[in-house]
Amino acid sequence: MLNEAEARPEQRDLLIVDDDQRFCDRLARAMERRDFAVQTAYSVADGLALAQRAAPGYAVVDLRLEDGSGLEVVQALREAREDARIIVLTGYGNIATAVAAVKVGATDYLPKPADADQVEAALLEQEEVLPPPPCHPMSADRVRWEHIQRVYEQCDRNVSETARRLRMHRRTLQRILAKYAPRN
């Protein structure tokens, strides 16, 4: 007969950083039921402090936080622990931010809303599985939106500089950035 330690898999340490406290707490409870030892942070500052104090083996970090970019936390986690599996989770997904996340050390990039099953699968995935090629090309609106987002990231998220480079009015750019990405 197996004792309790043999019956349960080893607990894995997980840091969740998201400024949406309800979402963060709900995901933390779901991941605890999946045998993760979870710590939560609701800001870049708290995430950085936890990353430096006890670098976890797993992390889920929101891209946009009230006090800055989650990419700062990703970079600190990667520097503290090279083997960490770090997932960037965001409601503002685009190609430019996905590339930036991978460059600073993210293992994967998931768009919100993502459920606990998707997060767990991304955290525990061992083989590099390539996604299938898209069935349909991106729409012209989506290509335009992706280009704007790429230039915005290149300008370090400075709206005025991005507007100058794109030769558009700053207010028009702000309206575009406030909207969600067009489908396909």
Image (tube, rainbow, N blue to C red):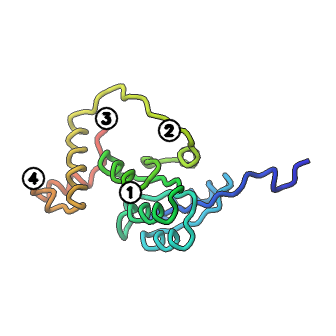
Relative to 72, residue 113 above or below: above
Q: Which amino acid type corresponds to the residue marked 3 in the rendered image? A: Asn
Q: Position of residue 175 (x, y in %)?
A: 20, 54
- Counting residues from the start of the chain, the first of labels 1 and 4 encountered is 1
Quadrant location of the C terminus in the rendered image:
top left
Label 4 to label 3, Cα distance in Å?
24 Å
In this view, the residue farthest toward the top is: 135
Question: Mark 2 touching mark 1, by CB under 8 A?
Answer: no
Label 3 to label 2, Cα distance in Å?
25 Å
To which residue does mark 1 refer?
Answer: 104
Q: Which amino acid type corresponds to the residue marked 1 in the rendered image? A: Val
Which of the two discs, 1 and 4, sits closer to the camera? Answer: 1
Binning the other alpha carbons within 10 Å of mark 2 as few (below 14), some (14 to 19) or many (20 upward) gives few
Secondary structure beneath label 2: loop
Residue drawn at the location 22% of the way across and 38% of the way down: 141
- Counting residues from the start of the chain, the first of labels 4 and 3 encountered is 4
Residue drawn at the location 48% of the way across and 52% of the way down: 87
- Counting residues from the start of the chain, the first of labels 2 and 4 encountered is 2
Residue 128, disc: 2
Q: Position of residue 102 (x, y in %)?
A: 39, 51
To which residue does mark 4 refer?
Answer: 168
- Counting residues from the start of the chain, the first of labels 3 and 1 encountered is 1
Residue drawn at the location 46% of the way across and 60% of the way down: 78
Which of the two discs, 2 and 4, sits closer to the camera? Answer: 2
Residue 166 located left or right of residue 6: left
Label 2 to label 1, Cα distance in Å?
18 Å
To which residue does mark 3 refer?
Answer: 184
Q: Nearer the viewer, residue 119 or 114?
A: 119
Residue 160, disc: none
Q: Nearer the viewer, residue 29 or 127?
A: 127
Q: Quadrant of residue 147?
A: top left
Label 3 to label 1, Cα distance in Å?
27 Å
